[in-house]
Amino acid sequence: MGCGRPVADGGRSIVTTQSRPCSTMPTPVSRPSTWLITMDLQKTCMAFSSIEFVVNALQSSLKRSRVIILLSTSQASTTVKKLKKLHPQHSFLTKWVPPPVKMTSNYVKNNIDISRKRMDVAALDMLQFHWWDYSNSGYLDALKHLTDLKEQGKIKTLALTNFDTERLQIILENGIPIVSNQVQHSIVDMRPQQKMAELCQLTGVQLITYGTVMGGLLSEKFLDVNISIPFAGPPMNTPSLLKYKRMVDAWGNWSLFQALLRTLKKVASKHGVTIPVVAVRYILNQPSVAGSMVGVRLGLSEHIKDTISTFSLVLDKEDMDSITEVSKKGRDLLKVIGDCGDEYRRG
């Protein structure tokens, strides 16, 4: 789901920035002593073998900052207790994607207890909940039981990943205290601003975005690349690049995407930053967006500089309007794909 830019050069997917305060996410100052770091080390329930490496690499680099770390599943959290003991001021956010079984109180409690035990904590700092099938209303049962565990002090805050506006409203109407929803959001994919953001503004729920640089498509690497010529540009040989190329195709075409990249490059050059920094800052400026996650590769220390640049970059009205103008030339993805998360639930 989400990935991130590194504060420490040595994580698979760690990262990002925030634009405004959230109940669980302190807002950084000009050169932040507070970082939102995200580690999405595996997809749904598959363990990712490099977590030990990532945790060990982070230990020596995160001593002076307050850090929030997201982990994609409870299995990945088995080694997090190392960091928690060394740096108790840090926060660790964990995803839970349960199978479509009956969500009893004992089932939910037992799964949360497993995560708490593996992380060696009395309470999970934040639990991010995902559910695949809306036709199975068990997600409400699960969230009600999670709310009970929150009231018992076993979970500090509850959040969602890839829920749509309709289901988020139902969840909130059932009295479940959701603080954030993690959704795909980029200059190409502005769906969260069409329905979700309005509900979030009314209720105080914040958005954490991923796909904000589209797997690297929103970068200088793909500027002026003619994909109709074989081997003329960088290969699109990763699942992430292929996924977001499909989003480009749904939104418009490669020619329009190049117009967007040229606009972003003009803004980036004006401010002395890179295209990804502008792309992230643009989304952070959107209503209800509290943070953004962007992907990294090991060994690329320049990502640290980019991350810091995102905090200090201020886009003026001319910058924002020029980007918005190109973004709106594409198709309405809410009509093409559906609401937030629908891309994962279409039959």
Image (cartoon, rainbow, N blue to C red):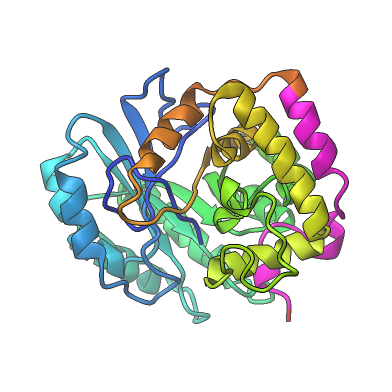
In percent of width and height, residue 51 lies at 25, 64
Identify which residue is drawn at 37% across, 20% down. Answer: 31
Front in this rendered view, residue 70 or 58 = 58
Q: Foreground: 228 or 3?
A: 228
Query: Would residue 126 be found to the left or right of residue 252 on screen?
Result: left
Q: In the rendered image of this protein, does residue 266 appear above or below residue 248? A: above
**Residue 96 among those drawn in magenta:** no
Say which quarter of the image contains residue 276.
Answer: top right
Point out the image quarter for the C terminus: bottom right
Q: Which residues are magenta?
A: 319-346
Residue found 46% across the figure and 28% down from its top: 309
Number of numbered markers: 0
In the rendered view, would you say 268 is above or below 344? above
Is residue 35 among the parts visible in the rendering? yes
Would you place residue 235 above or below residue 339 in this image?
Answer: below
Q: Judge by depth and name the residue closer to the eye, 162 or 174.
A: 162
Q: Residue 25: in sight, yes or no? A: no
Q: In this rendering, would 110 be left or right of 279?
A: left
- Name the residue located 49 percent from the left edge and 47 percent from the top edge: 293
Q: Position of residue 190 (x, y in %)?
A: 74, 47
